Structure formats: C-alpha cells, structure tokens
Amino acid sequence: MANEHTPGSGEAPKIRHVRASDLDAVLEILNAHHVNLGTQRLPFHADTQVAARIADDPHKVKLVAEIDGAVAGYGELETWPDRPRQRHGAEIDMIATHPKFRGRGVGPALLEAMVDLSDRWLQLTRLQLYVWDGNDAAIRLYERFGFEVEGRLRRFVVVDGAYRDALIMARLSDPIQPAPSA
Ligand SMILES: CC(C)(COP(=O)(O)OP(=O)(O)OC[C@H]1O[C@@H](n2cnc3c(N)ncnc32)[C@H](O)[C@@H]1OP(=O)(O)O)[C@@H](O)C(=O)NCCC(=O)NCCS
C-alpha cells in the first residue's frame, strides 16, 4: 500500500493532549480525504473551525499522537458530566490519522489511550461511537478493542454522493472496584 512510512517501522506513537500550536498539523489531518470520507467533515472547512475544535473544553479530552516529533493523529473523547443519567457513558468523537502516518499504529495508540482514560480514570462503563458501514479499517480497529456493533442506522449519512448506513458500536466495562485492603 502506498505510504511514505513502512508499517511497523520507526518510533511508536506517543500520546499527549493537543496544543494550540498543533493547529497546522491537525488541519492537515482533518482536511485529509480519507478523514472526510470516514467522518462528518465536509471537503472544505474554515481553519478557524479547527482552531475552535482543538480549544480547551472541560467535557472533551483532545489527544494527538506524535511520531518523531510530528503530529501523526488526532482523537477526541466526549464525556457527559452534565447528563445525570448518562455520566457513566462517553463517545469517541474523532479518531483520525495523518495521511503520511497511516498503518503505523496511530489509530490504535489513540484508541488505547481513550479506552484507558475511560476505564481507569474517568469511571466510565460505556464507551460508544458511530462508524459508517464499509469503513472496514475503523471497524476492525474498534473490534480489536472490544467494541461491538449494537445497531444499524439506515441511510444515516451522505458520503461522496451516496447514502450510507451508520453502525453504532459500544464497549461496556465493569465499574472500578475498591482496592483490596492490605
Ligand atoms: C481508521 C484510522 C483511524 C486507522 O488508523 P491507522 O493509524 O492507520 O491504524 P493502523 O495503523 O492500525 O492501520 C489500520 C489499517 O490500515 C492499513 N493501512 C496501512 N497503510 C495504509 C494506507 N496508506 N492507507 C489505508 N490503509 C492503510 C493497515 O495495514 C491496517 O490494516 P488492518 O486493519 O488490516 O490491520 C484511519 O484509517 C483514519 O484516519 N481513517 C479516517 C478517519 C476515520 O474514518 N475515523 C473513524 C471514524 S468512526
């Protein structure tokens, strides 16, 4: 598969929170054609919209993956502290890899970080996401992390001139237990 980087070679992705100075790289990611196809993004967006997207939001965790100092991927986890009956849930709102870094484990590294946050820090027991039917790389990735398809939303979205179904996928985990007393 044409890729500037050989899968499996080079540095493993490192995860950190996004910074305002990442704007140009996140723009390259969110404006990439494969991201346009896999998400709700249009082919054209104002740069200011992405600047607003990566700004601080106490309800969202916004992560980047770095490889060799370059921003290689972007992910968002949306939490719902203001929904008293759904505080135990959250949604993977975005996971996207820079076109130069596909196949380098960036998507898995971002997802692993979000699952770890969800399970071991934020006390969440339900993580959900929407994925377009036919986005097989994304569906395989989610299944590897224990997400299961819960339902199909028919004709949910238009992708490049055709209606596509969405799949809702979720991953349930057990509540955190008290540590055994010493
Ligand atoms: C889904 C996505 C995040 C996966 O990220 P990634 O960092 O490439 O993940 P991986 O390194 O695990 O590689 C995923 C697969 O792509 C393959 N791949 C490698 N290079 C590739 C390339 N240049 N183009 C397309 N796929 C490639 C890998 O071999 C791997 O195959 P596998 O699923 O059989 O293991 C990424 O494809 C992406 O940004 N998609 C667009 C946004 C999107 O659809 N997000 C999900 C919304 S629900």
Image (tube, rainbow, N blue to C red):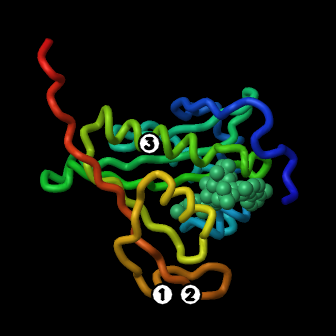
Q: As shown in the figure, which amino acid type bears the numbered disc 1? A: Arg
Is 85 left or right of 136, judged from the image as shown? Answer: left
Q: Which mark is residue 114?
A: 3
Name the residue rendered at 47%, 76% in the picture: 166
Name the residue rendered at 42%, 55% in the picture: 146
Asked if ligand 1 lies within 8 A of label 3, the reply is: no
Between the residue at mark 3 and the residue at mark 1, the CA separation in whole angstroms equals 28 Å
x, y percentage for residue 168?
40, 70
Q: Which numbered mark, 2 or 3, is in the foreground of this view? A: 3
x, y percentage for residue 125?
25, 48
Q: Quadrant of the N terminus?
A: bottom right
Location of mark 2 (residue): 163
Q: Residue 119 carries which label?
A: none
Name the residue rendered at 12%, 17% in the picture: 181
Q: Residue 155 carries which label?
A: 1
Neighbours of disc 3 within 10 Å: few (<14), some (14-19), many (20+): many
Q: In terms of sequence position, does the residue under pointer 1 or pointer 2 come before the other?
A: 1
x, y percentage for residue 161?
66, 86
Q: Is residue 50 visible?
A: yes
Between the residue at mark 2 and the residue at mark 3, the CA separation in whole angstroms equals 29 Å
**C-beta proximity under 8 Å, tags 1 and 2:** yes
Nearest the viewer among 70 and 131 is 131
Q: Establish if 115 lies above or below 3.
A: above
Q: As shown in the figure, which amino acid type bears the numbered disc 3? A: Met
